[in-house]
Each structure stands twice: as structure tokens, then as C-alpha cells.
Image: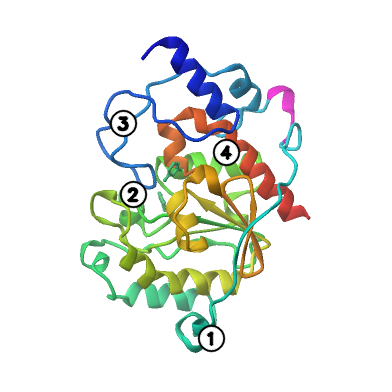
Amino acid sequence: MDDRVRRYLEQQVTLGGAEVILPGRPSQEPSRGAVPAEPEAPPLAPTASAREAEPPGGKAKGGADWRTGAPPIPGPGLVVDPPAQDLLTPRGKDYPDLAAIAKAVAACKACFLAEGRTNTVPGEGNPEARLLLVGEGPGQTEDQTGRPFVGRAGELLNDILKAIGFAREEVFICNVVKCRPPQNRKPLPDEMSTCIPFLEAQIDLVRPKVILALGATAAEALLKVRRSLSELRTKVHSYRGVPLVVTYHPAALLRNPNWKKPTWDDVRIARQLVDR
Ligand code: URA
Ligand code: URA
């Protein structure tokens, strides 16, 4: 690709335009939450504004904290109310605490994903967290350990949390599906809908101040729409009365560093909502 075209496209992304997939080496192994079939972006020199933005993984300049240059809280987006039929569905309301959900998850054989799992990965963290994060589903390391976001994407997530002043233990981290899909493929619609009562029950019990959806799968599952990530970002959606912000999946950031700046903006919006 012509260098000028590439630079122009990068700039559009940095300025908040739609995602573009720049041609590059095909990736070896799909990683959880990244867009599997897409070619991996080559390492790119950071643009000037990407350098200013820093965190996701980097260091803020001159000891500046997350408030420096944080974007204003955007306007409202989609609203998801509990569907009327939910009131008749006992499952989400049936658990006294998070441990009871984890136990039910461990015993669950309701979908195909149960067959291939080593461990279930119910989620973990502070039962009174103000911030609840939702990923797509366990990857290999998560399947082996039974813990969410402990692989490379998890390390980046820890750094991102730290940059907005949260220790991992302070928040609650979970996924749409609690068992690893084969080859880290995106969970199928029936797998997501079978598993989502567990997530809904977790959200009901934790009652966070803010939900952060990591990547398009989590956003789709919670907001019940299929839209591109760029359409869902930079709005404050409402999920059963809880403000919900959508950002890129950390695994996607590992593949495309151009998404780090918009992610840094998104998480600073979420951080402000926690304080509001
Ligand atoms: N990616 C996810 O979506 N969830 C995890 O727990 C780990 C990686
Ligand atoms: N598309 C996704 O599904 N997730 C991301 O994080 C970015 C693009």
C-alpha cells in the first residue's frame, strides 16, 4: 500500500473514524476477541496524536494522570431494559451470590462448549465492584487456569486498568461465555444466548456503577444489536439502568496499535462515569 494512503487511513482511525484493516502478515493464531480472519496489521510508527495519548500499555507523559486530556462524557446511546419475559425466567434471579453462579457454571452442560473445556471461567473480582468488564470468552490460558483475562490480553487489560487508577482486584472481570470456544472462534449465537443468564445474574448481583464492554461480541451480547464497534463507541448506553461504555478488545489492541488511542479515550470516559 502507498505510504501516503496508509498514513491517511491511520490518521482517520486516530481521529475516531471507522476501523480500517491495513494489509499485513496473516496472523498465526487467532487470539480471543480479536477479529480472527482479519490480516494482522504490521507494526506501525505511532502518529503524533497516538504518542500524546499514551497509556494502553504505555506510560503517561510527565506523570500526568488519566484526567489530563480525558474526553468529555458523550451523550446517550442505546437503552436495554429487562425484557418482560425475563421476569418469568427464574435463572437470572436464582443465585444468592457470585459463588453460587460459579458453581452453576461449573456444572453447566447446556451447550456444545462444555465438551471442549478444561475449566469453566465464570469471572472474578470484587463483588462490590464499581466497574464491571465483559470480554468475549475464555482463551487457552483462561481455559487452563479457570480465570478470565490472564493471557497476553489480560496483561494489557491490567495495565489499562492501572492507568485509570484501578487495581485488578477492585473491578469485576467476566465474559459473555464461560467456556472456551474451539480455536478461540467467536461464540455462536446459541452459545451466547444459552450462557448470558449467568452474565446477567452477575451484573444483577454486583450492581456496578459502570459496565465496560470489551469488543464487539460483548457489546452485541449486552446491547442485543449487531453494529460495528465504531458505531457503538463514544456513547453512554444504558443496560438495565447501568451506564455501559463500549471499547476495543485488548486482544485487538495487541494486533492493531492504532486502536490504543481511542481505547484510552473510552476507558477514561468509563472512569469518569464511575466517579459521577
Ligand atoms: N479474551 C476474552 O475475551 N476473555 C478472556 O477471559 C481472555 C481473553
Ligand atoms: N472488532 C472487534 O470485534 N473487536 C474489536 O475490539 C475491534 C474490532
Residue type at tag 1: Leu
Distance Cα–Cα, label 1 vs label 2: 36 Å
Q: Which residues are magenta?
A: 61-65
Foreground: disc 4 or disc 2: 4
Residues at marks 3 and 4 touching, judged by CB atoms closer than 8 Å: no
Image quadrant in which you'd find residue 133: bottom right
Distance Cα–Cα, label 3 vs label 1: 43 Å
The residue shown at (33%, 51%) is: 139
Residues at marks 3 and 2 touching, judged by CB atoms closer than 8 Å: no
Residue type at tag 2: Thr
Give above or below for 94 relative to 29: below
Q: Residues within 10 Å of mark 1 (few under 14, many from 20)?
A: few
Residues at marks 4 and 2 touching, judged by CB atoms closer than 8 Å: no
Considering the whole magenta stretch, tell me its main secondary structure.
helix
First-in-chain label (3 vs 1):
3
- Nearest the eye: 13 or 152: 13
> Is 130 situated left or right of 120 in this image?
right
The residue shown at (47%, 44%) is: 249
Residue annotated with mark 1: 87
Is-magenta flag for residue 166? Answer: no
> Is 17 situated left or right of 38 in this image?
right
Residue annotated with mark 2: 141
Residue annotated with mark 4: 263
- Label 1's element? helix
